[in-house]
Image (spheres, grey):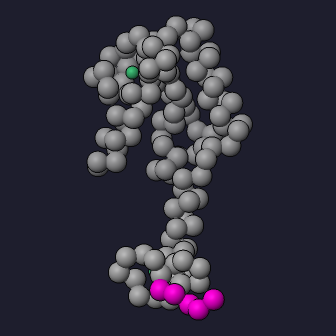
Amino acid sequence: MAPRPCIEPGCLDLAVATRCPSHQAALERLKRQRRPYTSAEKVRRARLVANWIATYGLVCPGCPWNEGRPHPVDPRTNPLTADHITPVAEGGPENGRLQVMCRKGNSSRVSRERSR
Ligand SMILES: [Zn+2]
Ligand SMILES: [Zn+2]
C-alpha cells in the first residue's frame, strides 16, 4: 500500500496506517485516558449505590444540578450513580474514594469541570 498523508487536519506527514506516528501516539494516549472502568470497579460502584439506597433511600445527597441541596431521585429518569471525588481523567486513582450523586448532578459537574 502506498503511503498516504496523515488524516489529522493540517498535518502533512506521511501516515503508517491512517495517521503519522506522532498523531498515532497522541491518539493512543487519549484512548488510554478514556479507558473503560474494570468490571471490579463497576461492581464496587454498583454496591456503593445499592448500600446508599438501602440506607438513605432514593435521595441525591446534593449536587450542582440542584444547587448543592439534597433531593429525591427517580431511578428511571435520573438514577443515582457513584463517581470519583477526584475524576480519573484528572489523575485520580481508579480505586479512589467515591461519592454518590444523581446522574444529572454528575453530568453538570463534568460540564462545569470541562469549562474550566
Ligand atoms: Zn499527523
Ligand atoms: Zn442530584
Q: Is residue 101 above or below residue 88?
A: above
Magenta stretch: give its range. 1-5
Count of picture labels? 0
Q: Residue at the right extreme? A: 40
Vertical side of 25 occupied by 35: above or below: above
At which x and y percent is residue 63?
A: 36, 24
Extreme front residue here?
1
98 in relation to 7, above or below: above
Taking the image as drawn, is residue 24 in sight?
A: yes
Does 75 lie within the magenta span?
no
Say whether residue 25 is left or right of residue 39.
Answer: left
Residue 4's spot in the image, x, y percent? 51, 87
Q: Is residue 46 above or below residue 85?
A: above
> Residue 39 sits in which quadrant?
top right
Residue lying at 45% horizontally and 13% vertically, measured from the top left: 74
The residue located at (61%, 29%) in the rendering is 45
Tell me the chief SS of the magenta region: loop
Q: Is residue 22 visible?
A: no
Pick the front one: 102 or 116: 102
Residue at left offset 62%, top offset 17%: 50
Quadrant location of the N terminus? bottom right
Residue 2 screen position, x and y as percent: 59, 92
Q: Nearer the viewer, residue 7 or 81?
A: 7
Q: Quadrant of residue 69?
A: top left
